[in-house]
Amino acid sequence: MKNYRIYLVRFIRYLKTHTKLLGFMEIESNTLSQKELFDISTYAYEVLKNEPSDFWGEVFKRNRQTFLIDKLVLRSAKNKSFAWLLRYIVISILRALHSSGDVLKVLAKTPKKYHISLNVTGDQGSKRKIIVWTNNTLRSKVFNRESHYLQYDLIVGCSEIDNYELMSSTELNFKAKLKCLKLKLRFPFIQSDVILEAIASNILFTKAFDELTCIGEDVGVFLREGVTPLSKMFLYTAGKLGLTRNVIYTMPVLTENLLVPRECDILVIISDSLPSYTYGATQTIVLGDNPYLPWRDIANSVPAAPTIGLMLGDCHNRWVQQEATDRAILDALATSGCSLCLGRPHPQELTRPDRLAYYSSLLKEYPFLKIENAKIETFLTDISLLIVYTTSSLVQESILCNRPVIEYRPDHDHSPNKAVINLSGGLGVSISDIRLLTQELNNKFSEGTVQRKINWERCINNLKLSATLQPDITKIFNRHSIKPRHLIDSSSV
């Protein structure tokens, strides 16, 4: 019976990974390299960047981008071998069956009840108000840390959220199910639950914004990145009411192949050290600072003991390759006599039992390794330097905080953080031979305080930031981002 359950779990996992976009990469060992995946991502970005699309095409643009990448990856992989051709056929059949079953589920199943809730915080006496979408995540709750504004935080879901007050609910009717089916036929690669949630959020955001129109004259709408269907719907609904929509990216260098939302009035970025692509009607504001991370304070601090940080995880979930890379790095650290390494997986990985089991096995194999998932500022304060092998915003945050970065390239011909390392002023280095890791660690640890500061100030200068002067972010937002409602042409939203 026990063996039966094990095989059943494995079979269910196999079905999930092969029906989910790019899910097959989690368990297949012979997938594409980082360079091949980057080239495919670049092509998909160029195809979709200026592609004209309607309302729902824009709402699901990120899903469409993932689908295009998945399709191109499968096409490339199937040419690798006969075994991959068979996998391609199996994946295609499983996905067709899964999509058909999803259509039947829409017809047979009663849709969930969706709620929109509100959390009000900040200065109750402020004349300036901000409406935000944080999805109740700590990383996005950054817009009102000093409580200059009265903040209205909206969230959509199927359950009640602590500290959020229920505003409205909706139960989708038969007409909504028909709309879902129509969209499912148009976008068969999107789960019906995702489509239904987007339809419900359109209804609920409209109700919530209608209710919030009376909160005052000077109002701004803020969210971080804004690429998910719900965040796109949040922006669209706010735009229909003439509210100024601000989308903020908290990275000095925007990730390559990033499709910023078309439906925003103001794109707020930390630095313009590298160009960012925006649509014609979008205004760009450069803060010249990262007010959401105490990077100057961390940069001037010294860890109590030499501590190595290790960014764990593969940006494409190529877990077979990741595990080989993790062990190569950890073996090198063990040989060099490392006493403490703080590993930081992506928080979403820690919600999956199989990934938790993997990281638990690493902790047993390497006694000097600890898994830390504290606040990002705590992690950066605790480490002396960071080792990475995949694209991550943590690389940028690390060099901002004067924590050197060593990038290990398992694929010798591709540096996933090349743009950032080129601007790092010597704080970042990239190696393709794991045998050089110990040497680079010794180089970084032997650097004097003066040289480290010189490198850091050079990096900050390259990023067009200031190590000492802090711009008044509130004044910038008051001038550009928080305004009275304006009349707009509804056809443009």
Image: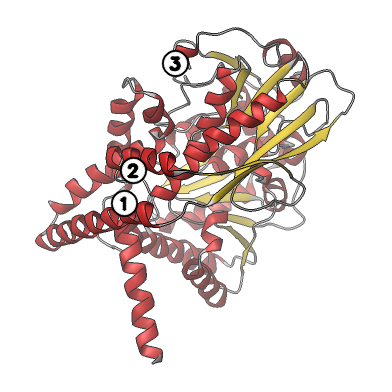
Q: Nearer the viewer, residue 99 or 311?
A: 99
Residue in view at x 34 percent, y 81 percent: 7
- Residue hosting label 3: 279
- Residue hosting label 2: 181
Decide: marks 2, 3 in contact (CB < 8 A)?
A: no
Is the residue 464 above or below the residue 424 in the image? Answer: above
Cα separation between marks 3 and 1: 35 Å
The answer to whether residue 344 shows anywhere in this view is yes
For discs 2 and 3, the disc positioned in front in the rendered view: 2
Which residue is outermost to the left? 82
Decide: marks 1, 2 in contact (CB < 8 A)?
A: yes
Of the residues under marks 3 and 1, which one precedes in the sequence?
1
Decide: marks 3, 1 in contact (CB < 8 A)?
A: no
For mark 1, give the secondary structure.
helix
Residue in view at x 39 percent, y 33 percent: 61
Q: Position of residue 344 (x, y in %)?
A: 58, 56
Density class for disc 3 (Cα within 10 Å; few <14, some 14-19, many ≥20) is: some
Is the residue 168 above or below the residue 486 in the image? Answer: below
For mark 2, give the secondary structure.
helix
- Residue hosting label 1: 103
For discs 3 and 1, the disc positioned in front in the rendered view: 1
Q: Amino acid at mark 3?
A: Tyr
Q: Nearer the viewer, residue 204 or 405?
A: 204
